[in-house]
Image (tube, helix red, strand yellow):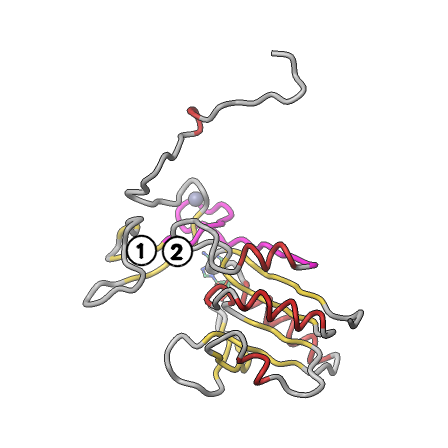
Amino acid sequence: MSRNGSLEVICGSMFSGKSEELIRRVRRAIIAKLKVQVFKPIIDNRFGIEHVVSHNNVKITALPVDHPYDIFDCLEDGVQVVAIDEVQFFSKEIIQVCDALADKGIRVIAAGLDLDFRGEPFGPMPDLLAKAEIVDKLRAICVVCGQDACRSQRIINGKAADYNSPLILVGDSKEGYEARCRACFELPNKSGSCLSAEELPLCFFGAEQ
Ligand code: ADP
Ligand code: ZN
């Protein structure tokens, strides 16, 4: 096993600067004359050279792939750095792929949403975060109160999306996302036994009560 390989994960909510940070690291690697390849998941059915574009319009070229194993097939000889954007959209095999690349001596930089619109861990992210040598959790600005934001609020037709809203909207519905903090995040109709902060049992470890 090579000594140089590692996995770095950049996570956070939408607008937290994940793509910007991934692009920054890729540019620095290119300045260092390292051989870099950038991948992203195919969101539609086209296959060809595309870009990673941040919300403030900084961009780099990226190769869209469908299955995580396609990254092995597309890997060029002598690659030293592999960057993967929107990594949360890949199937779980991406965990094994990132691990294998890092074991081969490649520096892997993966950026993705840690939480989905329900505030739940997103796909392969928990495993990637656990396996990474370096984790950066970025925060956006809450559009409601101006504090640091850690959640991606889904908005459908101008309102906070329902817990049970469909994954893909059809018809005329307009969907968008906002960065919000924990307090301003809304999720109407979340089911299950969700205890309020006052209802949570308190445990005092090591203290006489
Ligand atoms: P991500 O990949 O995490 O969605 P990007 O790197 O694409 O984020 O975009 C980050 C940029 O988005 C910021 O530098 C800023 O210019 C812009 N931006 C827009 N809305 C917000 C917000 N609510 N909080 C922080 N940055 C924002
Ligand atoms: Zn807020």
Question: Local crowd at mark 1 within 10 Å, few (<14), some, or many (≥20)?
Answer: some
x 53%, y 77%: residue:
59
Residue 178, numbered circle: 2
| Residue 136 drawn in magenta | yes
x 49%, y 68%: residue:
86
Q: Is ligand 1 closer than 8 angstroms to the Cβ of mark 2? A: yes
Residue 150, relative to residue 63: is it above or below? above
At mark 1, the secondary structure is strand
| Residue 118 drawn in magenta | no
Residue 159, relative to residue 35: is it above or below? above
- Ligand 2: quadrant of the figure: top left
At mark 2, the secondary structure is strand
In the picture of the structure, the residue carrying the numbered disc 1 is 155
Identified by mark 2, the residue type is: Glu
Region of the chain picked out in magenta, as a range: 133-153
Residue 118's x, y, as percent?
Answer: 38, 50
Q: Is residue 15 left or right of residue 1?
A: left
Looking at the rendering, which quadrant does residue 26 occupy?
A: bottom right
Residue 38's x, y, as percent?
Answer: 58, 78
Residue 85, numbered circle: none
Whether the residues at callouts 1 and 2 have beta carbons within 8 Å, the answer is yes
Instruction: Locate the N terminus by quadrant.
Output: bottom right
Q: Is residue 188 left or right of residue 143?
A: left
